[in-house]
Image (tube, helix red, strand yellow):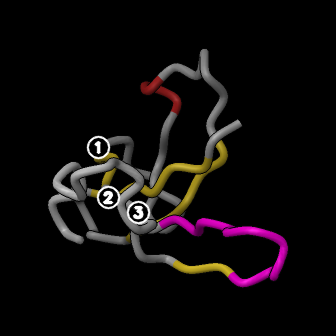
Amino acid sequence: MPIYTYRCLKCRHQFDLLVGVTADSAELKCAACGASDVEKIMSSFSVRMGSSGSSTSSPPTSSCASGSCCPTC
């Protein structure tokens, strides 16, 4: 199940939830004030590269031949 980050539109509290694929968005409630008026926001993620065990929260380097498929690289 994926973890999503939400922000309450009432109190602006930001929180993460483990949400099932078939979860009903009407069931989502703010962890701080209990309001159901929440929005899903972009959250950071970690990428594990190779066997060195290091992780990074930045996008991986471009894997395309021209290098132009990664707009931030």
Distance between mark 2 and mark 3 Cα atoms = 15 Å
Distance between mark 3 and mark 1 Cα atoms = 19 Å
Choose top left, top right, bottom left or bottom right for residue 9: bottom left
Distance between mark 1 and mark 2 Cα atoms = 6 Å
- Residue on which disc 1 sits: 37
Choose top left, top right, bottom left or bottom right for residue 22: top right
Choose top left, top right, bottom left or bottom right for residue 36: top left
For image coordinates 56% across by 80% down, the residue present is 56
Amino acid type, label 1 = Asp
SS of the residue under disc 2? strand
Helix, strand or loop: magenta stretch: loop
Residue 38 drawn at (x, y percent): 32, 47
Q: Are marks 1 and 2 in contact (CB under 8 Å)?
A: yes
Left or right of 65? Residue 10 is left
- Residue on which disc 2 sits: 8
N-terminal-most mark, 1 or 2 = 2
Most distant residue in the front direction: 65
Crowding near pointer 1: few (<14 within 10 Å), some, many (20+)?
some
Residue range (magenta): 45-54
- Residue on which disc 3 sits: 43
Residue 62 drawn at (x, y percent): 35, 60
